[in-house]
Image (spheres, helix red, strand yellow):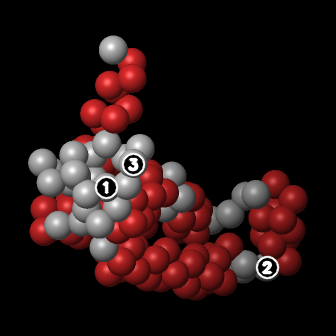
């Protein structure tokens, strides 16, 4: 489960590199533009898009990393959850590519929706996923959580 997480971290590092490059090329063109960035958070569109995309990497993907860690520590990762994790990461790469290039909302929205559904499936887990895993530590099973409520 760690390789998809590492692949996502590489995406974030690459985006930070792209942000530095675009800020240097488009935003830090003169002293006044650097002051506007510092004081009013105004920057060129090219670097602003990358900046927003980096912020996106700390929203939905946080739930991805939590799910991966839960799957790992409960020994519930399997081929289905690993494939779901890789597909989620691929959707994040595609979403980031669209965001920092054409920024077409229709494509970005579709890719976000795909990633959201994949993450939802990862959290729900397969029949042998962490929600249903009989070998999971106490408190990890839905049946143990719901049973006292009856």
Horizontal relation, residue 124 to residue 58: left or right: left
Q: Residue at x 30, y 73 (%)?
A: 1
Residue 149 locus on image (x, y percent): 39, 18
The residue that label 2 is drawn on is 30
Residue 109 locus on image (x, y percent): 31, 45
Q: Earlier in the sequence, mark 2 or mark 3?
A: 2
Position of the C terminus, as image quadrant, is top left
Q: Which residue is drawn at 32% across and 25% down?
A: 147
**140 or 40: which is nearer to us?**
140
Q: What element carries label 1?
A: loop
**147 or 57: which is nearer to us?**
147
Q: Which of marks 1 and 2 is nearer the N terminus?
A: 2
Q: Which residue is drawn at 44% across and 53% down?
A: 63
Residue 16 locus on image (x, y percent): 56, 78
Q: Can residue 106 be seen in this view?
A: no
The residue that label 1 is drawn on is 136
The residue that label 3 is drawn on is 138
Horizontal relation, residue 99 to residue 17: left or right: left
């Amino acid at each position: 489960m760690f390789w998809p997480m590492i692949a996502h971290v590489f995406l974030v590092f690459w985006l930070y590199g792209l942000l530095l490059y675009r800020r240097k090329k488009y935003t830090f063109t003169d002293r006044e533009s650097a002051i506007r960035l510092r004081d009013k958070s105004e920057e060129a569109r090219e670097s602003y898009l990358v900046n927003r995309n980096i912020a996106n990497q700390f929203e939905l993907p946080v739930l991805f990393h939590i799910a991966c860690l839960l799957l790992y520590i409960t020994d519930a990762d399997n081929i289905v959850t690993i494939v779901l994790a890789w597909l989620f990461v691929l959707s994040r790469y595609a979403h980031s590519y669209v965001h920092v290039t054409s920024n077409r909302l229709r494509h970005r929205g579709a890719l976000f929706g795909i990633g959201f559904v994949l993450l939802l499936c990862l959290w729900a887990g397969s029949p042998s996923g962490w929600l249903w895993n009989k070998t999971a530590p106490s408190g990890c099973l839905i049946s143990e959580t719901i049973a006292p409520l009856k």
